[in-house]
Amino acid sequence: MSIAAQSKVIEIDLWPNGAPNESGLSGPEELSGLCVNNVSHAVLYVYPAENPNGTAIVMCPGGAYAGLAMAHEGTDMADWLNAQGVTLAVLKYRLPNGHDDVPLSDAEQAMRIMRSRASEWGVNRNSIGIAGASAGGHLATTLATHYSSTETRPDFQVLFYPVVTTEKGVTHQGSIDNLCGKAATEEQMQRFSNELQVTPDTPKAFIMVSADDRAVPVANSLRYFDALTRNGVISSLHVYPTGDHGWGFKDTFPYKDLWKAELEEWLRREVTGR
């Protein structure tokens, strides 16, 4: 992320009067490798586009619901998206610690905030999407299939190698254990297997994944794409031959230029209409 992007970031406390639920986490945040751990305070970092085209994306970084890869799955994308006219908001959501309602509460609140301040940033209230990588992709698909009102419904979704299903052997088990707890009920497993929750009202989707992903099997993306198309939801699935998992905005991913171009084109055609 450039110095210019850093200088114009707007930092918003999601719950200035206190959150409606708690995860049980406390103490300071911890940096471990590329992830911020022990996140118990939700913050939205907004990077408004200088020449906005009316579109905004709320990005949910991944990290197995145990940490947040805030840079390469979040803030590093600000300059590029801003150059397209897209306002980026990176959501530092509270980690669940087995409290499955906590991340979704934060994602819904982020959508409320974006819509309430849309005119301030030159954003169309009906052109605000949710995005997510890995476990952040699970949160994005959870919002897309569990939103509680028109105010919190995203207008589109962009998914990087998402966790989608909760089925053992197909899901990323660590993510689901961190979200729901290791003693999760069958009802929780059904509810958070998001390919089962798709309806014709689920927002349109752009999905990208590597065929050789060893952390989150490509079947997660395939199942979600299949559910979307069966429900008549506009969807675009991009499976790259190699790259494994967790590439986000890293230059080391061999198909970075390709996915950027394909997403730019999809946003123009399906979101901005230009």
Image (cartoon, rainbow, N blue to C red):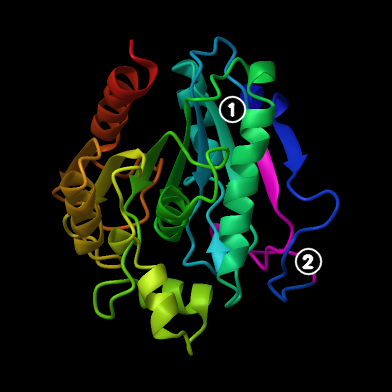
Q: Is residue 211 at least partly visible in the picture?
A: yes
Q: What is the residue that sits farthest to the left in this orientation?
A: 241
- State whether residue 7 is above or below residue 230: above
The magenta span reads 27-45
Q: Identify the residue at image location x=44%, y=56%.
A: 142
Determine the secondary structure under disc 1: loop
Residue type, numbered disc 2: Pro
In this image, 122 relative to 273: left or right?
A: right
Residue on which the image places disc 1: 2
Q: Is residue 17 or residue 73 the one in the foreground?
A: 17
* Quadrant of image for the N terminus: top right
Q: Is residue 178 or residue 187 the one in the foreground?
A: 187
Mark 2 to mark 1: distance in Å? 27 Å
Q: Identify the residue at image location x=61%, y=75%.
A: 97
Q: Position of residue 121 (x, y in %)?
A: 64, 19
- State whether residue 217 is above or below residue 108: below
Q: Position of residue 64 (x, y in %)?
A: 47, 67
In the rendered structure, which disc, 2 or 1, sits on the residue that comes first in sequence?
1
Determine the secondary structure under disc 2: loop
Q: Identify the residue at image location x=60%, y=15%.
A: 122
Q: Is residue 236 or residue 143 the one in the foreground?
A: 143
Q: Is residue 270 or residue 241 the one in the foreground?
A: 270
- State whether residue 29 is above or below residue 4: below
Q: Position of residue 40 (x, y in %)?
A: 72, 64
Q: Identify the residue at image location x=78%, y=72%.
A: 26
Q: What is the residue that sits farthest to the bottom in this orientation?
A: 183
Given contact means CB atoms under 8 Å apart, are the residues at marks 2 and 1 in contact? no
Residue on which the image places disc 2: 28
| Neighbourhood count class around disc 2 (C-alpha, 10 Å): few under 14, some 14–19, many 20 upward | few
Residue type, numbered disc 1: Ser
Q: Position of residue 223 (x, y in %)?
A: 20, 59
